């Protein structure tokens, strides 16, 4: 924390925890750049904090430089600007926003030390607790810190007339239409209300994960601009914000978004999420991996192998949140000499996905109907024939896509726009019913592993009008008051879902669902908070992979330790020790 300025959040909310906040943490200044933290000994879980990224941030990306550090944390001559009326007048800045403390992926947990050593050097058998650094298995500590810290940042806003607004504006800020940019505004409001993603950009050290060497990314320019946008939507004191700066950064990554032509909201979502992933890809050196062809006899093991291959090249917050796995089954239907069809050759591949694009037909009435159509067996013939490795030629074949592993955040894109044989584009205005809560996908998901797939709706991107003239808006559920809001560019209004007919209609275009794993508590009104747990995906921690989250998790052991089986409550225990001792990651039994 900048020792010259007071902390804008409560004394403990600048800390992050996986379970619950401890007793207040006291600070004392040692010199002009160091803060000493005094933790109560019995504090539960305390974060490992990079002090250099905490403090008061300006509302533009020059803040890091003006605090005396560049983007990579290197010191520069400070050019202090103040967030209130202190300091010399020429150094005051009316565009300052308070920032939350940022934490990384490591936390301190209480660990039991097996033996005390007495004065003679003999272990006396006594045990005591000590704080030990561990890798966090989820982002729960970030979520708790952001929830607690938002109030403090509103209080630190530099406009006295707007202080005390607390959570009144958080997530309820409109976006200026820059000229046919309603498609962008609608998508951004839906992503803004994707709470784990917003928590990541508000309270996590995302700069520490920027991949400056990835030629597929923007060297962090896109994610820094998106983080700045997120800060204004959740920590700002103005009811409207202009996304012009963000649009400029996006256009550098995807040039076809330059100018002010109308574009497709789902197309923007795809480019934006892909750009964020490439900027934050934790894999610096990507090995060449050729996925093997599978025959469908060991789907569970083959899917895990495919996921491990994918993680060796891709690991980011986008993978953690949005990416699941599809099973693609191709079956030969070549006519044989005896008149039968098919040589018996089957090819199965497991492909990652970031969103599901579901077809809409005149027979579809519900979202489940669209999903059934997506998973129907498709006959490939004529120009679409498939090359069979056994027949050694292109043959008629069947193709079937199934949901195999589902992500914590599920984005559904309804394919309402189609092209005729002549190339003319039209829109399908079929009314589709979609569940607002408890969407059960257990029958559609084919894997035996994974969290039970129960999903709640939290945002919708709408398109009204036709191909030539239309308008995008959004609905989203606020994280704090639980109410639904309608976002129409710069306007944001609370709505009654029943009166707005949310849950059905012909305008729903992109649907955003979060997987419900547990209910943490109920407030006085009887409403319960449902949570989505985000597990950090990496090649070194297979016990956190979605395939391993199953009822009998103890049956599936990591090959790092012959004597340790992971269960849901033990994911952090011993993990760092195994990684630091060089155990080879991998899985047994399920992949044998």
Image: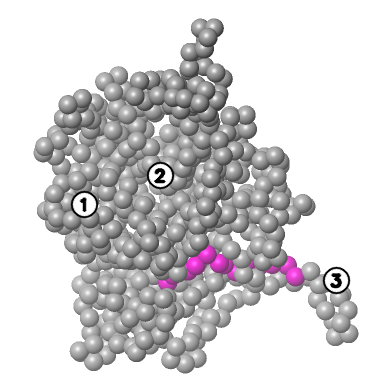
Secondary structure, mark 2, is loop
Mark 3 or mark 2, earlier in chain: 3
Q: Residues within 10 Å of mark 2 (few under 14, many from 20)?
A: many
The residue tagged 2 is 354
Front label number (1 vs 2):
1
User: Residue 35: which numbered mark, if any?
Assistant: none
Tell me which residue sits at (36%, 66%) in the image. Answer: 219
Distance between the Cα atoms at labels 3 and 2? 52 Å
| Residue 45 belongs to magenta span | no
Disc 1 residue crowd, few under 14, some 14–19, many 20+, Cα 10 Å: few
- Residue 254 at what x, y percent from top left? 26, 54
In the rendered image, which quarter contains the C terminus?
A: top right
What residue is disc 1 on?
256
Give the total number of marks visible in the rendering.
3
- For the residue pair 423 and 434, the one nearer the viewer reads as 423
Relative image position of residue 243 (x, y in whole percent): 21, 60
Q: Look at mark 3 in the image and give the residue it sits on.
A: 125
Q: Secondary structure at mark 3?
A: loop
- Looking at the image, which residue is at 47% across and 78% down? 51
131, above or below 258, in the image: below
> Circles 3 and 1: CB distance less than 8 Å?
no
Crowd around label 3: few <14 · some 14–19 · many ≥20 (10 Å): few
**What residue range appears in magenta?**
101-113
Q: Nearer the viewer, residue 266 or 190?
A: 266
């Amino acid at each position: 924390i900048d020792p010259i300025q007071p902390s804008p959040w409560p004394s403990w909310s600048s800390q992050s925890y996986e379970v619950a906040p401890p007793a207040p943490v006291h600070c004392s200044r040692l010199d002009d750049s160091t803060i000493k933290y005094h933790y109560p000994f019995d504090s539960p879980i305390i974060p490992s904090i990079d002090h250099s990224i905490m403090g008061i941030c300006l509302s533009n990306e020059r803040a890091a430089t003006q605090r005396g550090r560049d983007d990579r944390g290197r010191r520069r001559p400070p050019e202090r600007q103040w967030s209130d009326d202190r300091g010399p007048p020429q150094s005051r800045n009316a565009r300052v926003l308070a920032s939350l403390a940022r934490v990384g992926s490591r936390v301190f947990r209480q660990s039991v030390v097996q033996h005390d050593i007495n004065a003679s050097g003999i272990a006396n058998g006594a045990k005591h607790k000590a704080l030990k650094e561990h890798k966090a298995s989820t982002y729960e500590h970030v979520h708790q810190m952001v929830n607690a810290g938002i109030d403090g940042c509103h209080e630190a806003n530099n406009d006295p007339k707007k202080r005390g607004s607390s959570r009144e504006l958080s997530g309820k800020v409109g976006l200026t239409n820059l000229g046919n940019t309603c498609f962008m505004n609608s998508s951004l409001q839906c992503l803004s209300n994707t709470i784990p993603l917003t928590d990541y950009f508000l309270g996590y050290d995302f700069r520490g994960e920027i991949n400056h060497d990835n030629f597929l990314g923007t060297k962090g320019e896109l994610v820094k601009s998106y983080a700045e946008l997120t800060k204004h939507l959740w920590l700002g004191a103005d009811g409207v914000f202009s996304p012009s700066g963000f649009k400029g950064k996006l256009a550098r990554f995807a040039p076809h978004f330059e100018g002010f032509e109308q574009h497709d909201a789902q197309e923007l979502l795809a480019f934006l999420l892909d750009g964020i992933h490439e900027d934050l890809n934790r894999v610096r050196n990507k090995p060449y991996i050729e996925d093997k062809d599978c025959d469908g006899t060991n789907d569970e093991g083959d899917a895990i192998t495919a996921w491990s291959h994918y993680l060796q090249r891709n690991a980011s917050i986008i993978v953690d949140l949005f990416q699941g796995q599809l099973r693609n089954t191709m079956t030969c239907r070549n006519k044989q000499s005896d008149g039968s069809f098919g040589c018996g050759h089957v090819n199965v591949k497991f492909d990652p996905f970031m969103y599901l694009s579901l077809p809409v037909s005149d027979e579809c009435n519900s979202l489940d109907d669209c999903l059934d159509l997506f998973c129907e067996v498709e006959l490939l013939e004529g120009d679409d024939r498939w090359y069979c490795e056994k027949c050694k030629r292109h043959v008629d074949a069947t193709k079937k896509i199934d949901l195999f592993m589902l992500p914590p955040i599920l984005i559904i894109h309804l394919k309402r726009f189609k092209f005729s044989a002549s190339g003319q584009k039209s829109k399908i205005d079929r009314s589709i019913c979609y569940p607002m809560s408890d969407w059960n996908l257990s029958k559609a998901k084919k894997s035996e592993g994974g969290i039970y797939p129960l999903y709640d709706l939290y945002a919708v991107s709408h398109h009204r009008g036709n191909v030539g003239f239309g308008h995008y808006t959004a609905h989203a559920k606020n994280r704090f008051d639980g109410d639904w809001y309608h976002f129409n560019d710069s306007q944001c209004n609370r709505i009654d879902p029943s009166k707005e007919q949310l849950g059905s209609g012909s305008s729903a275009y992109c649907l955003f669902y979060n997987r419900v794993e547990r209910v943490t508590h109920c407030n006085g009104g009887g409403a319960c908070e449902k949570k989505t747990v985000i597990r950090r995906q990496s090649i070194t921690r297979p016990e956190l992979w979605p395939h391993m989250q199953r009822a009998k998790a103890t049956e599936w052991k990591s090959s790092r330790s012959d004597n340790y089986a992971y269960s849901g409550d033990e994911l952090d225990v011993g993990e760092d020790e195994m990684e630091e001792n060089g155990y080879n990651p991998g899985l047994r039994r399920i992949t044998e």
